[in-house]
Image (cartoon, rainbow, N blue to C red):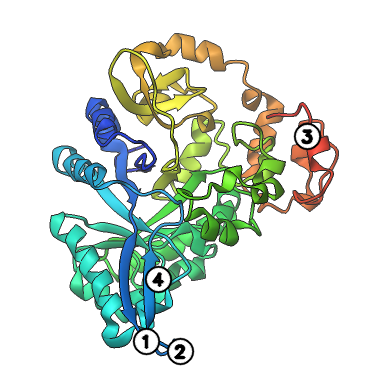
Amino acid sequence: MNLAKRFSIPHRDNWPSPSLYYEAINSSTHQFKEEIYDIYFGAKFRYNYREKEAWDNYPKPHEVLYGNVMGVEATNEQIDNLFRIQKDFGIEISLTINQLNVPIELYYSKNDRVLEAFINWLQEFYDRGLRSCTLANNHLMRSGVLHKRFPEMKWKNTVNQQVSTAQQVLDYLYLGYNVVQLDRSLNRNMDELKRIREAVDEYKERYPEKHVKTCMLVWEDCMPSCPFKREHDDLQMHLRKINYELNPWSQLTCKTWRDVLGDNTIPRFGTNCYWSSVDTFNEYAELVDIFKYSGRLSPIIPQGNGTLKAGWLFSNRVAADSFSTIIENKFEPLYLWIFGTGIFSQLVTDPEIIQSGLSNNFWMTDQGKKLERVLMNCKNQCHRCHLCEKTFGIDDIQSILEPEIPAKLIGKKH
């Protein structure tokens, strides 16, 4: 399996240091760098002006804020270092503008002043060498103005637009997107992934000159089709002023069914890919071009003496310097490994020790492998299945939102 340009990884927008992330990428192995498709980061467009717009009763200040919904963004110094990464190592960087709530001024301001300012803001990134951007704005994509202004840009939709069928994938390609980021539900729907692969291949045959990829967010611990997601994103934008996770509203949502580390207690509470074996990973890799990992919010900076290095970690104690290393050594289950940074000299990297530590993992038992196969195509129709509950000794759950959920989960963890 060729792993070149297979992984989309986050910039640590929440880190206070302007250069530490560059140092981690710089210290990583050549093989790791070869495996990275892009590094995505957040930034917000700001534009303030005073005007009596068509919807105003009198002249008033307008404060336009448009960008990413994570509530953090890369600093100017961090962006400088991201462009250094792109120049020095050939790893493409990708701007994220994934806000679904579009400011009315962007479309309707007098003389299109806000739209012009927004496009000029994008132009600054483009002139510096940016060639990849996530943009959740289908009207702008359909207009063609961005493709004309930025002919070399590769455009991504956002996962939050919930593209979940082959027909939707084609629709987004015809809107003008190059990289279609798939809905989380497809992590558990191999049947539809096969239909998407077929549709995309046919599209590429028809338009061989176009850069077209599919991308899957494989690990985020989000509830399937979460009814709070849109509201959460609107609130999360204000993270620097009001932290949703520390606010009483958050007690109604994720914290009910996650553990203290923010992880799901059993697989049915999320849409993560549970790749136990290399064979399972290969099945997904034949259907999806890019695997994306979340983590822009991560505030954790490894401490201690030694060189900070980017790679793949699990349990914050074990590290592999490339995904190829994981595949070649069959460090299974694969789902345990996530993109991370660490001082590798302080971590376990010896293959024999790693193998020994993984050998008794639940997911490598017959029971674990059975659950893995079911999860690949369960479509999150949990009320018809309950295999997760049966596997981990929990009473059947009809909905994650049942008020009895916390009591059912005491002492349970996959």
Residue wearing tag 3: 409
Q: Is residue 153 above or below residue 369?
A: below
Q: Is residue 121 above or below residue 253?
A: below
Label 2's element? Answer: loop
Percent coordinates x, y for residue 359 in the rendering? 58, 15
Is residue 409 shown left or right of residue 106?
right
Q: Are marks 1 and 2 in contact (CB under 8 Å)?
A: yes
Of labels 1 and 2, earlier in sequence is 1
Task: Name the residue at 34% across, 24% down.
Answer: 321
Report crowding for label 1: few under 14, some 14 to 19, many 20 or more residues within 10 A (C-alpha).
some
- In depth, the one of 239 and 292 nearer the eye is 239
Residue wearing tag 2: 57
Residue wearing tag 1: 52
Percent coordinates x, y for residue 160 in the rendering? 50, 60
What's the residue type where badge 4 is placed?
Answer: Asn
Report crowding for label 3: few under 14, some 14 to 19, many 20 or more residues within 10 A (C-alpha).
many
Residue wearing tag 4: 137
